Image (tube, rainbow, N blue to C red):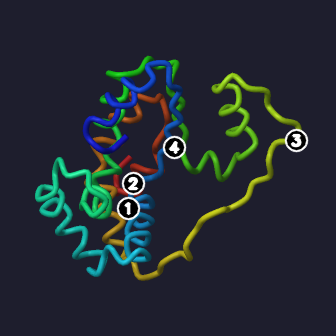
Amino acid sequence: MYLPGVPERIRRYNPAMKLILLLREPSDRALSHYAHSRRHHRERLPFPLALMLEQRRLARDWGDFDWNSSLRWHSYTDRGRYSPQIREMSAQFAAEQMLFLKTEELVNDHDRCLGRVFRFLGVEVPDPLPPHEVVHTSERRHWAPAFCRRWVARQCYESTLELEGLTGWDLSRWKHAAGGG
């Protein structure tokens, strides 16, 4: 959903496509993305410096969808600005074709969340539901300074406010991470 033009390409491929959009609190998402980039040897900078240089890196590679592009590996904060991405998806797909979920819903209320997914897809809800299982995770990093998490959340704050309006969600926790709401 993040890469420019992708929603239009998806619609051209299948205009009846159903989309499940799983959104994560922006600072949690950025930290996870950073850890992923480190794990794959795509990032050598410390987290604070990587955040400071992100916009410069993205500007350099804008429009480059190559596997090595910064759009893929260094878009830590920018990907957490969900509202422009959702507006682009909404321009290509009807609201009933999109299911928005928060990562914390999937983790904290797994069965209800999976039930929503099955119903959205129009398939039978299995009984019992598949068990909650963590299939990929990295250990919690204590090296991420709190000011970095706040900085990311603040950079995404306006988008988070708009996201509340687009989804009807209460994003108080996300706003609190930025020192607001």
Mark 2 neighbour class, 10 Å CA radius: few under 14, some 14 to 19, many 20 or more: many
Counting from the top left corner in percent of width and height, residue 16 is at: 49, 19
Q: Are marks 2 and 1 in contact (CB under 8 Å)?
A: yes
Q: In the rendered structure, which amino acid carries the disc numbered 4? A: Leu
Name the image quarter holding residue 1. Answer: top left
| Circle 4 SS class | strand
Q: CA distance from mark 2 to mark 4?
A: 12 Å
Rendered view: 82 above or below 87: below
Residue placed under numbered mark 1 in the picture: 30
Residue type indicated by callout 3: Pro
Which residue is at the front of the view, 170 or 19? 19
Task: Please tell me how crowded label 3 is: few (under 14), some (14-19), or many (20+) other residues with Cα within 10 Å.
Answer: few
Name which residue type carries label 2: Pro
Closest to the camera, between mark 2 and mark 4, is 4
Kindly tell me whether residue 149 is visible in this rendering.
Answer: yes
Residue 11, placed above or below residue 180: above
Mark identifier at residue 22:
4
Residue that appears at 30% across and 47% down: 157
* Residue in view at x 60 percent, y 65 percent: 136
Q: Is residue 76 visible?
A: no
Q: Nearer the viewer, mark 1 or mark 3?
A: 3
Q: Name the residue beneath numbered marker 3.
A: 128
Q: Which residue is mark 2?
A: 26
